[in-house]
């Protein structure tokens, strides 16, 4: 009897140990990659903190198993106000205007963040950014995007999604990190600005067809872009709402070296 009671007393402890081991050894569940777009300008004095935040989000949330894919879009409507942003594009301004209509914003402004094409807010608000990203990361990934760069000047793209996604575009962005500008005039005159994930090129590759897209896409890389700092980002965006349903990115390492 003494031996029976001893075994009975040890049983709950063994169960507790098993539960602890199961919790600590269970692998983390992959979460949806979240696209964070920042509309910014070197001519805007409130934009540098937002630029810095964009660079921090990927690192800060990676520890929570959340993949953030940053995209820095430099708009051109500040260019006539004392400083011309060398990264600015009228096309990026048009993209922001499309979001203003879809998300019912009075008009484009800087800095503005848009998370997965679904929610927007002032781009230097770190708390709201993390909250919006966590919310989107908890949603199911509707479109699965696979991207690889087997050749130095091409990327292979494979997208699969339910037909119910409807009309959606496959987009390709080329981004560059570790960019610095010494601003000579305007609201940021005399400052040295640092940028992450600056969008160098944005292309619409095509539409999903019967829930799929498969292509080898040639890259258009300018000589002045630093190859070790480049990434290719592919995302699926619904044409009506602007909602991003899936995304992936890959580093464009120089394979000739």
Image (cartoon, rainbow, N blue to C red):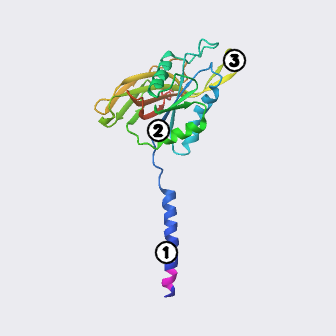
> Residue at the location (68% across, 22% down)?
192
Cα separation between marks 3 and 1: 71 Å
- Disc 2 packing (10 Å; few <14; some 14–19; many ≥20): many
Picture quarter containing residue 128?
top right
Which of the labelled discs sits on residue 33, or is there none? Answer: 2
Label 2 vs 1, first from the N-terminus: 1
> Residue at the location (58% across, 32% down)?
54
Q: Where 21 falls versus 160 (above or below)?
A: below
Q: Over which residues does the magenta segment extend?
A: 3-7
Which of the labelled discs sits on residue 189, or is there none? Answer: 3
- Disc 1 packing (10 Å; few <14; some 14–19; many ≥20): few
Q: Which of 51 and 192 is in front in this view?
A: 51
Which of the labelled discs sits on residue 11, or is there none? Answer: 1
- Disc 3 packing (10 Å; few <14; some 14–19; many ≥20): some
- Expressed as whole percent of the image width and height from the top left, the position of residue 117 reads 46, 31
- Expressed as whole percent of the image width and height from the top left, the position of residue 222 reads 50, 17
Query: Was residue 5 drawn as part of the magenta stretch in this picture?
Result: yes
């Amino acid at each position: 009897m003494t031996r029976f009671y001893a075994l009975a007393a040890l049983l709950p402890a063994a169960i507790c140990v098993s539960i602890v081991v199961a919790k600590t050894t269970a692998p983390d569940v992959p979460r949806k990659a979240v696209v964070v777009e920042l509309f910014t300008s070197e001519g805007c004095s409130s934009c540098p903190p937002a630029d810095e935040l964009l660079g921090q989000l990927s690192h800060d949330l990676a520890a929570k198993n959340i993949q953030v894919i940053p995209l820095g879009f430099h708009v051109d409507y500040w260019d006539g106000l004392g400083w011309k942003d060398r990264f600015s594009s009228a096309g990026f301004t048009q993209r922001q205007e499309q979001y203003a209509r879809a998300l019912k914003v009075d008009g484009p402004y800087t800095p503005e963040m848009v998370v997965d094409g679904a929610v927007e807010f002032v781009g230097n608000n770190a708390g709201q950014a993390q909250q919006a990203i966590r919310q989107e990361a908890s949603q199911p990934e509707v479109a699965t995007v696979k991207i690889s760069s087997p050749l130095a000047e091409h990327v292979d793209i494979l997208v699969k999604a339910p037909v119910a996604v409807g009309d959606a575009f496959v987009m390709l962005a080329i981004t560059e990190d570790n960019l610095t500008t010494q601003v000579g005039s305007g609201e940021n005159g005399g400052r040295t600005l640092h940028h992450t994930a600056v969008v160098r090129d944005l292309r619409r590759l095509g539409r999903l067809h019967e829930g799929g897209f498969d292509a080898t896409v040639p890259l258009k890389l300018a000589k002045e872009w630093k190859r070790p700092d480049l990434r290719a980002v592919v995302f699926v965006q619904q044409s009506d709402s602007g909602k991003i349903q899936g995304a992936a990115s890959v580093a464009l390492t120089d394979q000739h070296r």
